[in-house]
Amino acid sequence: MSSKSGKPYTKLAVIRIRGTVDVPYDVEHTLKLLRLHKKHHCVIIDDRPEYLGMLNKVKDWVTWGEIDADTLAQLLRKRGRLRGNKPLTDDYIRKYGWNSIEEFAIAVIEGRASLKDIPNLKPVFRLAPPSGGFKGSIKKPFTVGGELGYRGPEINELLRRMM
């Protein structure tokens, strides 16, 4: 899918950082729409205006940024799950016209494919807490030394520590 200008949408990785206690109803509802039910869950979305509005609403509970093809391939290989909690493999990807998980990840980033193109692939990636812990406060924005909100390409480093 592409924007009105014909350019494909950028892929964003969104990770829920904070838990479920004292979450206002409207924020909780938006987190459910994003499929971020639990702490350390990650989803991949487009940078469409609709999603950006949702991210602005939940910015005090999540962090997000632009994911690159290498990190997406690692995420699919290490944390990608099919129904029945089976791991995603190159053999399964080959059934649907891709030679490898890496090739599929590049196609997703370039906008030629979607995660929905792989049947039974779960849309949520369950991550571990980051190795070495969080570098800042999980209650402050990323721009002032915290962990929440938009972090740009630095999301890739956090994802690698959480896989």
Image: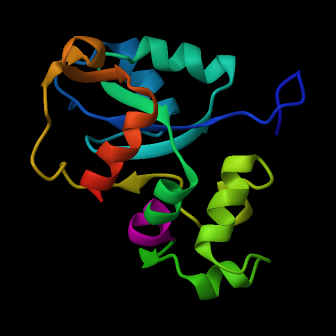
Above or below, comparing residue 65 to residue 81 in the picture: above
On screen, residue 42 versus residue 105, left or right, reads left
- Which residue is painted at 51% across and 43% down in the image? 67
Characterize the magenta stretch by its predominant secondary structure: helix
User: Eyeballing the image, is 60 above or below 79?
Assistant: above
Residue name at image x 79 percent, y 36 percent: 8
In the figure, residue 133 lies in which quadrant? top left
- Report if residue 80 is visible in the image: yes
Q: How many marks?
A: 0
Q: Is residue 21 above or below residue 77?
A: above
Place residue 145 in its image quadrant.
top left
Would residue 146 appear left or right of 80 to someone viewing this image? left
Q: Quadrant of the N terminus?
A: top right
Q: Is residue 118 above or below residue 126?
A: below
Say which of 80 and 119 sits in front: 80
Q: Position of residue 99 (x, y in %)?
A: 71, 81
Asked where in the image residue 38 lies, by quadrant, the reply is top left
Q: Is residue 22 left or right of residue 124?
A: left
Q: How is the image coloured?
A: rainbow
Residue 109 percent across, percent down from the top left: 66, 49
Foreground pick, 39 / 148:
148
Name the residue rendered at 44%, 60% in the picture: 75
Q: Quadrant of the C terminus?
A: bottom left
Residue at position x 44%, y 12% in the image: 57
Q: Is residue 77 covered in magenta?
A: yes
User: Residue 127: in sight, yes or no?
Assistant: no
Residues 72 and 33: in front is 72
Q: What segment is highlighted magenta in the picture? A: 75-82
**x%, y% of residue 51?**
60, 23
For residue 95, side relative to residue 59 (left or right): right
| In magenta segment, residue 38 | no
